[in-house]
Amino acid sequence: MNTKTLFLLSFQAVFITAIDPFLPGPYEVDFTSINPEIFGELDHHLDVFTPRSAGTFPVIVFLPGMSCTVSAASYSTILQQVASWGYVVLGPWAIFYNPINTYKAEWVDHVLHWSKLHFNNQDLKTSLGVHPDLIMDFNTLYLGAQSSGSHVAVEYLKQSQDCSSVKAMFLMSPVDGVDPYGLINDYCIHPPTLLNFQTPTMVIAGGLDSIPGMDNLGDLMPACAPKDLANDRFYDALTGPSVLINTTAYGHIDCLDDDMLDMLEMIHFCKTDPNTDKDAYRTFVAGQITAFLRFIGEGDCAMGALLGEVTREGIEATVETKGGMLTSCGEAGCSWQGGPFAHIRL
């Protein structure tokens, strides 16, 4: 075989294996929404995104914002694109649920138990809108969350005692506490104490997160993600491989689909810039999540370049890493201990 032929074959191999996580993946995606059971174990709505294919797929448990009262379907642009790369997304939410109980996170295990019994039951899965030959791998779990849903995700891992089924976590504009005024003393993070678990984590922050939606009212209207309760608070408490991506021109709710975003914009609920391209932002967020999951969970080390530097056209962002994130390709997993970790993993 001559050098020219070898070069062409090498080029073809690179071309075939290289992927663009900012594009839809190879799978069509099915969506179904399941109502809570009146007398059963499932006490939350469950929005479900699944690849329309036979096969075994890892499961993402996505915990939405506003104490998990926003439907996971309100993030469908992002979640559908992530699912198209071969992930099942389970998004539990409930409009009427005690927020204190929500933040205790004990209910998450009930949702997972119900899902294991029903989605991998051959007689039930088709009626639930899932491909008959799709298998959900509940031993390969990823946690995802937005806003105060991140409080639930972190609390769930803190109290788990065994988080070995969780392989990584991604948080979009995470917020701690019960209310933005800090009136209720209920937090999952207590600076400067570090967290008691280690799992690869990506935090995507918005540069406008800490600005109130109505910034002409002084301190009467708090930001949706107050600086001392959001983003850095989570990143600083993590001790495993971690990356913080700050999208400087975007706000707390810009990851939501247009219908929900438009409604919240009308009441100036959170700060957002009407001149920024929200479609481009949602595509970016979905692509970064996919790159992170592939890098950590599938050993796709080519995705590491996207975690170390943001080069997406039209998106300005700063990136910070720690805990050996960029050398953690394929190192999915979670470690738990009874007290805080004393150091950041090197």
Image (tube, helix red, strand yellow):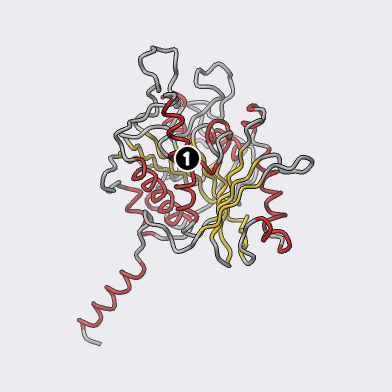
The residue furthest bottom is: 1
Residue located 45% across and 47% down the image: 77
Residue located 25% across and 78% down the image: 8
In the rendered image, which residue does mark 1 sit on? 171
Q: Does 14 appear above or below 126? A: below
Q: Is residue 87 shown left or right of residue 206? A: right
Task: Classify residue 320 by image quadrant.
Answer: top left
Q: Nearer the viewer, residue 11 or 99?
A: 99
Q: Nearer the viewer, residue 6 or 193?
A: 6
Secondary structure beneath dot 1 equals: strand
Quadrant where the C terminus is found in the figure: top left
Q: Is residue 56 shown left or right of residue 175? A: right
Quadrant where the N terminus is found in the figure: bottom left
Mark 1 residue type = Leu
Residue located 48% across and 52% down the image: 80
Q: Is residue 70 shown left or right of residue 97? A: left
Q: Nearer the viewer, residue 192 or 124?
A: 124
Residue 12: give x, y in percent of width and height: 30, 74
Residue 5: give x, y in percent of width and height: 23, 83
